[in-house]
Amino acid sequence: MLGNSWFICLIRPIAWIVFLFPIMVGFYLGASKDTSLVTIIFGFGTLFFVLCFGFSVNALGDEDVDIYHDGRSKDMILSRQPLVRGDLSIFQVKLLCLLFLIGSLLCALVVGFYFILTIIILDVIGYVYSLEPFRLKKRPIGDIMCNALLGVFFFLAGMTLGNPYLNPLFIVTVFLMASNFYIPTVMTDYEFDKKAGLRTSAIVYGAKQLSRVMYLLTAIICIFGVVLLLSVPFEVQIIALLMTIYTPIFTIITKKRLQGNQLTLHQNWILVPFGCLMFVFFCLALLKIVA
Ligand code: GPP
Ligand code: MG
């Protein structure tokens, strides 16, 4: 069955939704009549390889943690990853990672300079987040920073497929939003990461501190959202409005589902809204291109 194939379990396309959302928002903002079909095909081809690379190196680095996972709050039961089950050897996964990396760089060459730059940065963050000697996912703050930067650079990658709209306040808001949406995912991993002996932000600071950070981030995001609503073009206002409405809802739900240091939050609180919105923004981008 496709859903259980080793390839799908390695690359985890359902989990990509988290990153496809900022990509589509960026793609929508940058899209214009000048965006060519070749750019779209090679641009999305590149992003496919980057996502394959990021998730494969993550599987490579996380074998020690994934072995404990039972499916909670994730797109799949991670203990069924091909490396954990022995369907693939470490050498085979390393080889696939190398192919994905080369694929991402070659496809990006067709698109343009700024796009290549964002892709190199994304590949580097994917590597340092998951693999030793860096493995920033096991360092407090490092885990949040990497994911927040992934959110920003996936957004910029989507946008550099067309004409970049570089509003510093908007980019900072994307960064803060990505941080706010990542924090609960590190809280849901608390039990497995602790068993594996990792020192993530959730383990070092505890859920109470991180919830306070989420409240602070939410307040700042809402303030910036209102400033953006009052100062940016209509197409950016739509995004600012969505950010300002959904961020506090998400933060309150997270707080309600917290018991001690363990958060039980269904993955669909992120995957469903992000999945629907990414589809809407993709369609809106195509409309801008063909209209
Ligand atoms: C999942 O991380 C993987 C990533 C955030 C890396 C993606 C990188 C790219 C360049 C696409 P995780 O280990 O925190 O979560 P999980 O436990 O789901 O593997
Ligand atoms: Mg992992």
Image (spheres, rainbow, N blue to C red):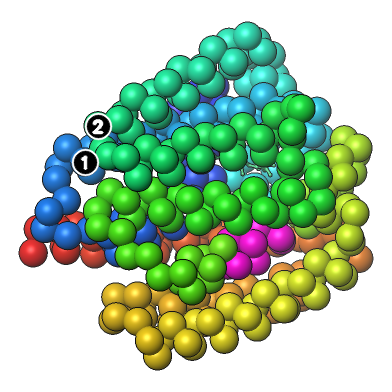
Q: Is residue 177 magenta?
A: yes
Query: Which residue is identified by label 2?
Result: 110
The answer to whether any part of residue 50 appears in the image is yes
Q: Is residue 88 above or below residue 22?
A: above
Tell me which amino acid carries mark 2.
Val
Secondary structure predominantly adopted by residues drawn in magenta = helix
Judge from the rendering whether residue 235 lies leftward or rightward of residue 148; answer left or right.
left
Q: Is residue 196 above or below residue 60?
A: below
Q: Residue at x 63, y 21 (%)?
A: 82
Judge from the rendering whether residue 117 lies leftward or rightward of residue 188; answer left or right.
left
Q: Quadrant of the C terminus?
A: bottom left
Residue 197 x/y as whole percent: 91, 37
Q: Secondary structure at mark 2?
A: helix
Tell me which amino acid carries mark 1.
Thr
Query: Which residue is identified by label 1?
Result: 39
- Mark 1 is surrounded, within 10 Å at the Cα level, by few (under 14), some (14 to 19) or many (20 or more) other residues, namely some
* Of pointers 1 and 2, the one earlier in the residue sequence: 1
Residue 113 x/y as whole percent: 32, 40
Distance of label 1 from label 2 (alpha carbons): 7 Å
Q: Secondary structure at mark 1?
A: helix
In the image, the segment drawn in magenta is: 176-185
The answer to whether any part of residue 249 appears in the image is no
